[in-house]
Structures are given as structure tokens and as C-alpha cells.
Amino acid sequence: MIPLERIRRAQERLKDEIHRTPLLASRGLDTAAGATVRFKAENLQKTGSFKVRGATNRVALAAEAGARGVVTASSGNHAQAVAYAARRHGLAAHVVVPEDANPAKLEAVRAFGATVEFCGTTSRERLARAQALAAEQGLAFVPPYDDPDVMAGQGTIGLEILEAWPEVEVVVVPVGGGGLIAGIASAVKALRPSVRVVGVEPAGAASSYLSRQAGRRIELPAGLSIADGLRSVAPGELTFPIIQEAVDDLVTVTDEQIRAALWTLLSRLKVLVEPSGACAAAWVLDPSRPLAGRRTAVVLSGGNVDAATLARLLSA
Ligand SMILES: Cc1ncc(COP(=O)(O)O)c(C=O)c1O
């Protein structure tokens, strides 16, 4: 697991750089979930997602170590977070994206001053290019999840949940490559081992769920879901052992449940959450799951969705 001390140091490093996001509550949603539920609103975080925590922690350490700039391979929330963190720390950011990247997301990355480079369509091609750039130009590579300092940054969410709601009994987290849940589970289990940590994946991209069943990391041919941040084809080499050790349950939800949760959060809680960010809520709001009245914190991990996608999701 990520040592608690490392997560606490990340919290100290981040304290003036990010928002301490609220835990939102709604009586109506408590009734719907059959439990006392609090929603950790990382959709209201700087850059619109939790990714800024891990990215800022990693970029701050790179700046301290004298890096000339940073590079990453991502087109989504992590890219925005790295671009934002690099600008805050006075470093250049280079972002390698797929040729078919969403133009709205690229606009946000460029708005934070990053250089965008197109490369192929597979994550393997992008990763190779980013690592080559790091070696050629002396840039620090900032991985989206498979890095202890990125995970430590994401783990600060676990500290904040325990500080704000010491009575919490269950923490429910969306899972992509697993950095978010590995960080949160490390913090929560170190401080309160009896709290249950549940990871939620889309049924069409359930790589951690299936890897756990297989007892080893397995790679899916493709990740299919409306939750574009959770389409990882495999859990990380570093995240998976932590998930195996510290996550109590891995469960899945359908795209239909994610879409319904997105609308419920918008109409009842008045917050806009993107499909990946609504995945954990989709599981909690399904009346057949076994929460049995327990005090449950749900991570709403992001809120970045463009108008055309939102209109499509809400009209379906
Ligand atoms: C909104 C959102 N939630 C959750 C995740 C999953 O995070 P991780 O890959 O660390 O599991 C992502 C990843 O991009 C995301 O963008």
C-alpha cells in the first residue's frame, strides 16, 4: 500500500493548491439508497476532477527535483490536471493525445498553456512517444495512475473523507486504472481498517473486477462504456497489488445505471457529474445493493462533459 506518511506529505503539498471539496447530502437520496450517503464532490475540484491531486503532487516533486518540464500521454482529465499543475509550478507541459481526441477536451488542455502533440490511436503508441520525449528532452513523465506519488495525491481524498466524517463505514470509488482507489484505500485502511472500500467499474470495462477473479492482471481487448475515464483495458502494475490488498469489494454497473445516476445527481443534488464520475453513485443508488443503512461516502470523481455529449446522455 502507499504509506500513510507519503499521503500526508502530499496533503501538505496540496493544501494551498486545490479545493477541499464538500461532502454533499440529500435526504431524498438517502431514502433512495437505503443508507446515509455523503457525496465527495470532486466534480467541483479545480480542473473539474480529482486528477489535479495526483498530478499536482507529482509535478511539484518534479519541479523540486529541477525538471525542465513535464510530459504525459492522456486526452482526458489527467491531461488537464497536468497542464494546470505545470503552469502553477512554472514548468512547460507536453501532452501526447490520440489522433481522434475530443476537441473540447483538447481546448481545455491548451487553455492551461500545454503543448498538444497527436500520436496514433492506441495508448501503447502514445506512452512510447511520451517516454521518448521524456528521455530526449529531460522532461519528467507524469503517469495517469501507475505512480506512487500520483496515488498518494489521490489518497488525500481518503484523508479528507475521514476528517470530515469520522463515522463513515463504507467508501465507494470509481475504478479506471486504479490510482484513485489505490490511494484512497491506502489512506482509509491505514487509519480505519474496519471501513469497507468498494470499487465500481463499468460492466464493459471491468478489468480490475475480472483480474481479481482471475487472480492476476488481465488485459481486455477493449474497454466499452459511456464512462470514458474508466475504459482502461487493465489495472496498473502498481495499482493492482494495492487493490488486491486493500479493496474489499469490486462491483460493476451498466451504462444505463450510470446514465440514470448522472440525471439523479443533476436533478436531486444539483451537481453536474460526468459518466465516469457518476459510476460509484450508480452502484449506491441501485436499490438491490447491500448497503443496509450504513454510513456511505461516494466519490463523485469528475464533472467534465461537453454540451453535445451531455445532451446525448440526457435525451437517451
Ligand atoms: C472522472 C474520473 N473518474 C475516475 C477515473 C479513474 O481513475 P483511475 O484511473 O485512477 O482509477 C478517471 C480517470 O481518468 C476519471 O477521469
Image (tube, rainbow, N blue to C red):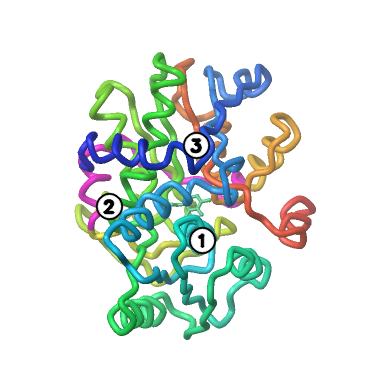
Mark nearer the viewer, 2 or 1:
1
Residue under pointer 2? 239
| Cα distance in 3D space between marks 3 and 2 | 18 Å
Question: Going from the N terminus, do you reach mark 2 or mark 1 first?
Answer: 1
Query: Where's residue 133, x and y in %?
Result: 35, 81
Please tell me whether residue 208 is drawn above or below residue 25 in the rendered image: below
Q: As shown in the figure, which amino acid type bears the numbered disc 2?
A: Thr
Which one is nearer the viewer's eye here, 45 or 264? 45
Provide the residue span drawn in magenta: 238-258
Is-magenta flag for residue 256? Answer: yes
Q: Distance between the residues labelled 1 and 3?
A: 27 Å
Which residue is the site of mark 3? Answer: 299
Q: Is mark 3 on a helix, strand or loop?
A: strand
Q: What residue type is labelled 1?
A: Arg
Q: Which residue is drawn at 39% across and 16% down?
A: 166
Decide: few, some or many residues near mark 3? Use Cα within 10 Å; few <14, some 14-19, many ≥20. many
175 versus 207 height, above or below: above
Q: Image quadrant for the N terminus?
A: top left
How crowded pointer 2 is (Cα within 10 Å; few <14, some 14-19, many 20+) is rated as many
Q: In this view, does 166 lie to the left or right of 99?
A: left
Q: Do the residues labelled 1 and 3 touch (CB within 8 Å)?
A: no
Amino acid of disc 3? Val
Read off the residue under disc 1.
87
**How many angstroms separate mark 2 from mark 1 (CA)?**
27 Å
Where disc 1 sits, the SS reads helix
Q: State the residue at coordinates (47%, 27%).
A: 297
Kindly identify the residue that appears in the image at 44 percent across and 34 percent down.
172
What crowding class fits label 1: few (fewer than 14 Cα within 10 Å), some (14-19), or many (20 or more)?
some
Looking at the image, which residue is at 76% across and 62% down? 308
